[in-house]
Image (tube, grey):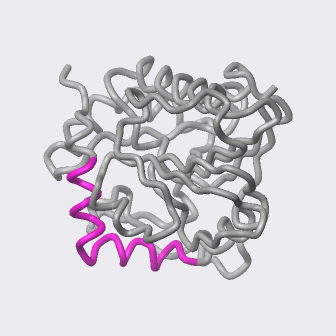
Amino acid sequence: MAPERPGDVARFFDEEQAGQRYRNLKALTRAQDLAAADRLNREVEGDVLCIGGLWEHFSRGPAVRRVTVLDLSPRMLETYGAGVEAVVGDLYACELPSGGFDSVVFALVLHHVAQGGWRECRARIHDALARAARWLRPGGRAWILEYCPARPWMPLQRAALPFTRAFLRRVGQPLVVMHDAPFYARALEQAGFRDASAERIQPPSFDEWAWFPVFMATPWLRIPVKLYPKMHLFRATRR
């Protein structure tokens, strides 16, 4: 089983960012992205590490001292502009200062770190959160913005993983695996966090009967948003 390569992921997102397809997708999720940004822009503070890019509609609040963005793609990092410390690197290979940050944010990135079989996909989430805990100061906070399927869908996603991988390779997209909300709550606790909470991001203006692409690379394969995994914002404090 060939693993996903960081270079493949970077190239995919470079192409998406440069093309109309990504902008069309973000237009569909604008109400959700704005609602999530409202929380993050108000809550995130201190020395901030954003993994996999800034969140949509980022605004630097007065409580933010420094913003560091870790991303695989130099091209993506260039889009964030001045005032951001850019670090090109792989989350799983990059070493950042232990206890160097007050806030760590994973904004719609963890479903893209999938690699290998089901156990490895889960283990990579645990590893990512353990790294975040190491980079945070005691009492620092982590935020995870993610799409989470309902728990009954998880066995189906696990069984379909080989077919999903093969299909996505054919359409030129790296593997995607989404995890349910209880999994993230447990993973945060196991990584050394406390007071984990989850909020579903569901603004009143969001049309749940709009047709939404199942994958970024397949705008022609759509389902109603009502059936799509739901956006959640997780918060937790490092012990």
Q: What quarter of the picture does the N terminus occupy?
A: top left
- Residue 232 x %, y %: 66, 52
Residue in the picture at 18% in, 24% down: 2
> 9 above or below 194?
below
> Looking at the image, is 30 positioned above or below residue 16?
below
User: Closest to the observer: 88 or 129?
Assistant: 88
Q: Residue furthest right?
A: 195
Q: Is residue 211 above or below residue 39?
A: below
Q: Position of residue 122 (x, y in %)?
A: 49, 24
Q: Quadrant of the C terminus?
A: top right
Q: Is residue 82 left or right of residue 215?
A: right
Q: Position of residue 109 (x, y in %)?
A: 47, 47
Left or right placement of residue 59 versus residue 219 in this view? right
Which quadrant would residue 42 be assigned to in this image? bottom right
| Front residue of this view, candidates 87 and 210 | 87
Residue drawn at x 62%, y 43% as measured from the top left:
150
Magenta residues: mostly which secondary structure? helix
Which of the 4 image quarters holds residue 194? top right
Span shown in magenta: 10-30
